[in-house]
Structures are given as structure tokens and as C-alpha cells.
Image (tube, helix red, strand yellow):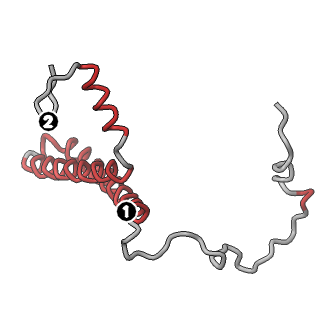
Amino acid sequence: MPKTKLGEQISWKEFFARWKKGIDGVTPLQQTNIQVYSTIIMLVGIVAGIVITLFAIKSLWWLCLVLTGALGNTSVSLLGLWQKKNVLKRLYDPTDDVEDISLEPEDTFDNGLEITGMDNKDSPFQDCNKEVLI
């Protein structure tokens, strides 16, 4: 039987109910932090594997090739997770001295250029605003 931090014995049903409640409370920032640290551990393992295969390159050249590809792929994954972590950190930490990422009215994407040469009747998107009946 599982025990609580206070030493009380609880049933397995109660244990899994508490576990589920704890897992549901994990924020996306916490999930991303775990993913970043796990990816760093994977990168260390891949680099160690490459170094070890270099000692037996004649027989393990194919493994070195596979690990080199995995190194690139995992590095790009780490970069994306790092960017995601920084965005989530800005969203969850309002005291952070980072510029506001919300769009202000002056932050429109209109650069003053006008698209010419296509009437609405020629547009491939002319039916986009019509209602769809199901």
C-alpha cells in the first residue's frame, strides 16, 4: 500500500487520484523545462556515442553516421524547445523585464502596398465568406 508524505497509508485508488490531480496541475512551462533538460541529456549521450564510435570507425562507421544525423536533429529540437521555453516564461512571468509581446494598434502588418491586377471575381478565395450548409 502506498503512503503519503505524512506516513498515512492510502489505497491505490486514492494514490492514483492524487497522482492524476498532480499531473493535471503541471503547467506548459514546467513541461517544456523537463523537455529541455531531457534533450540536453540526449545530446550528451549522442556526443558520447560519436566519440566512442570514432575509436572503432572502421567497423562502426555506419553508427557514427546515424549518430551524427541524430545530433543535428536533436540540436534543432533543442533550439525549438528553448524558444518555446522563453515565450512561455514571458507569458507566465509578468514581472520579467521583457518587452510586451502583444500587438498594439500601430503594429499592423499593412505596409501601404496595394495588391492590383485581380478583381474579387477572379480571386480563388471569393467563396471563403459564404456560409457552408451541412
Answer with left or right where residue 116 lies relative to residue 81: right
In the image, what residue occupies the spot 85% across and 42% down?
Answer: 131
In the image, what residue occupies the spot 23% across and 46% down?
Answer: 67
Q: Disc 1 marks which residue?
A: 89
Q: Front-most of 130 and 61?
A: 130
Sooner in the amino-acid sequence: mark 2 or mark 1: 2
Three-letter code, disc 2 = Lys
Classify 30 as above or below 87. above
Q: Position of residue 83 (x, y in %)?
A: 39, 62
Front of the two marks 2 and 1:
2
Q: Quadrant of the N terminus?
A: top left
**SS for dot 1:** helix
In the image, what residue occupies the spot 22% across and 47% down?
Answer: 42
Three-letter code, disc 1 = Lys
**SS for dot 2:** loop
Q: Front-most of 11 and 41?
A: 11
Image quadrant in which you'd find residue 116: bottom right
Answer with left or right where residue 111 lies relative to residue 133: left
Image quadrant in which you'd find residue 59: top left
In the image, what residue occupies the spot 37% across and 49% down?
Answer: 27
Q: Position of residue 101 (x, y in %)?
A: 50, 70
Q: Position of residue 125 (x, y in %)?
A: 81, 53
In space, the residues marked 2 and 1 are separated at their CA atoms by 30 Å
Q: Disc 2 marks which residue?
A: 5
Classify 126 as above or below 132. below
Packing grade of label 2 (10 A; few <14, some 14-19, many >=20) is: few
Q: Position of residue 80 (x, y in %)?
A: 38, 57
Packing grade of label 1 (10 A; few <14, some 14-19, many >=20) is: some
